[in-house]
Image (spheres, grey):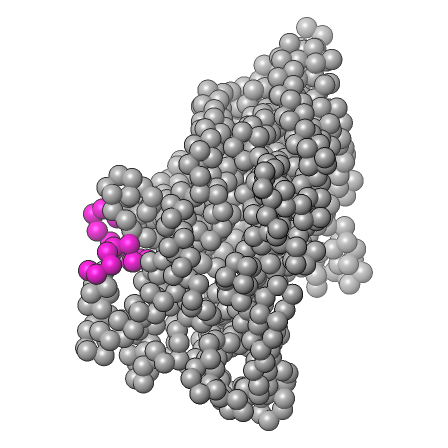
Amino acid sequence: MRKLFLILALFLVPVSALAVQPDEVLDDPVLEERARDISKLLRCVVCQSESIDDSNAAIARDLRLLVRERLVEGDTNQEAIDHIVERYGEYVLFLPPFNLANAMLWLAGPLFLLLGLMIAFFHVRSKTRATGNEQTPLSAEEREKLKSLTGG
Amino acid sequence: MIVELGHLCLILAFVVAIIQMVIPMIGAGKGWSDWMRIAVPAASIQFILTLFSFAALMYAFVISDFTVRLVAANSHSAKPMMYKIAGTWGNHEGSMLLWILILTLFGAMVAWWGKNLPPELKARVLSVQSSIAVAFFAFILFTSNPFDRLAMPPADGNDLNPLLQDPGLAFHPPFLYLGYVGLSMAYSFAIAALIEGRVDAAWARWVRPWTLLAWVFLTIGIALGSFWAYYELGWGGWWFWDPVENVSFMPWLLSAALLHSAIVVEKRNTLKSWTILLAILAFSFSLIGAFIVRSGIITSVHAFASDPERGVFLLWILGMFIGGSLLLYAHRASELQSSSVFSVVSRESGLVVNNVLLVVATLVVFVGTMWPLGAEVLTGRKMSVGAPFFNMAFPPLMILLVAILPLFAVLPWKRGNLGTAMRPLSGALALSMALGALAWALQSGKSMLAPLGIALAAWLVLGAASELATRSRLGKTDRNETLRRLANLPRSDWGKAIAHAGLGLTVFGISCITAWQAEDIRVAKAGESFSVSGYTLTLEAVEIGEGPNYSYETATIGLSQDGNRITTLNPEKRFYPVQRMPTTEAAIDRSLTRDVYVALGDAQGNDGWAVRTYIKPYANWIWIGALVMAFGGTISLTDRRYRVGAPNRKRPSANSAVAAE
């Protein structure tokens, strides 16, 4: 692990400041905007939780240039992303695709919400039901107190 | 010598903590008051010993004693004094020591101010609190001793990570730790209550202020961190969904849930076992956070200790405190009976929905954060889950929460009617929708994000305001009567309104900056002017020089609008030679309506410089909102029922006409 950090540190040292460099920007604003959108979805592989759009690392710059190259050659966004994933692996994808293996990741929110609201609803309704007909029995403590008050 | 004394104090504190863990617990079980009473002086002694130990370490940093390994590795003689002091906790060992200092401080505070607590409860709380301290003292002493000496001390130190050499970041860890560790109080009270099998309004009145305090500190800590990232990282990002941010965010969400459910326990004597579970979960997520950050299991900028031995030790602590408490919970929770009943439409139900949404939001963040780890362990796939995922999965839950918040906040306890509750809010709702529509009309066919965000933000702020207006009978009675009623409102109601409005301000800032930010990247030559969104910037000069422990390049950029000069901006690039690390010091012209944010890049060939300019509308409201939230929490903390000696079991309601919440 430590060795890895050293290697990473070497990557990081020579470059500085600013993510997207002026010389990378495409002349066609539509293509450039698409490139920026794609860049935000791709991870800089030597950084920590930074997209290539934000990263200063040299490799992020290479990837940004590669994305732009593909777009200029006429790739769709998805084709450009697939091309990068093919080369660098699933690891570069910040937004995992919705498939069987990732189903729980994507469904966690809706499922938990549904489950939580259902449990809450049944709990609250059971509380409501108790209003009309049942009276809460005295707790042991309250019985004790009652006893002492009534002198029994 | 002082360093060795610091080490000795740490060991003594460890011993005292063991005594405080064992004796009062036995005493409480057997009803021996002498044994229970030991907890109070023990908590004070433990705190004082730890304080001295921490001061000794800070002293070593201040005098740059490079015979101490930690100082040599993390400090430098040329560093400004403020960062020498901050360097004490800018590393793994020192931050652990700060963590435990705060832990013992909270224990001591219960000992000092808990005079009204029932003696058994107090003994048990202090014992549980001390058991946490025992675990962390052992962790520090056996795996992360900050007082290690070097046989061959270097001539000068290794310096603190330059990114940390900034006031915003230097002081954000103490706030976060006050928050994380503050949740240990709720945990200790929860465990003590489980052991006693008793939770009542007085218990909730004790737990809630601690939770509130922890939440206020977490709010400030997270806001400081975000504010720092905004100006330091050079492109104005303020939240990255980085694993380390997420682990601070999860306790924040859970403590927000807890401080709401504790209200239900206090006022209505129900939701007890759920509140206990939340208290356990909130501190568990603090521990999980400590584990994730320090084990290096998920690497991140913040993960300064990547050491398997420490990771395994922390995992043991984690397993014991989370597993143990959940076992105890499973065994004892059924004994906690809730007496009161409420209808589906009631304040209680509203707070239940609030809890469901906050807990589900926490789980979503948790699943997203841990997913890559799980996938790698189970299937060997290396994958990432980053900001784009969280930006899709998290906001819907918050939108839902914010949409129902103002209405549920005014529902009466026990049984309410949505129509009746909605009536005083209809003006706020109509105005919010109008503001959203206005934003949509002004922005000329972009996304729905800003209009929706602005409508929700206005709904929160106006909803809070109209609640105050209703409570003070504004317009229904004369002005003096309204003022009198406002002044007599309980502080906790003021706190509630202020904190909810603060959330609205943050939502407003986030929506505007996300939807309407403008960006410009270019190469500018000296003397060249360019315009961005109606502002004209002129690169006047670039100066190269030397700072105290870095070299710099500083640009002078004139900022003007419609021919009037607004200000001069000096974005800077620094290079710290000791750590061979560059940093960006962006120049920001701040105002309430927009920030002009300029960062300087590398020199580009023949006297050109890369310059990156952003116009960030309403950016500062993100942090103003967070401060307002923290302020609301603080106001609520000063409510009379929480003052020292608060948990008197009954209190005559003096101003019940107004206070009947």
Residue A70 to residue B86: above or below? below
Residue B540 falls left or right of residue B84: left
Q: Nearer the viewer, residue B490 or B282?
A: B282
Number of numbered tags placed on the structure image: 0
Q: Residue at x 78, y 40 (%)?
A: B654
Q: Nearer the viewer, residue B284 or B236?
A: B236
- Residue B400: x and y in percent read 44, 54
- Residue B509: x and y in percent read 53, 66
Mark yes or no: residue B529 visible. Answer: no
Query: Is B192 within the magenta?
Result: no
| Secondary structure, magenta segment, majority class | loop
Residue A90 to residue B287: above or below? below
Quarter of the figure that contains the C terminus of chain B: top right
Task: Write down the region rendered in magenta.
Answer: A86-102
Mark yes or no: residue B287 visible. Answer: yes
Q: Residue at x 70, y 17 (%)?
A: B36
- Residue B244: x and y in percent read 47, 49
Q: Quadrant of residue B597?
A: bottom right
Residue B123 falls left or right of residue A104: right
Q: Quadrant of residue B177?
A: top right
Query: Is A89 within the magenta?
Result: yes
Q: Residue at x 31, y 41 (%)?
A: B374
Q: Quadrant of residue B527?
A: bottom right
Residue B329 to residue B274: above or below? above
- Residue B380: x and y in percent read 24, 43
Q: Residue at x 33, y 58 (%)?
A: A45
Residue pushed farthest top? A152
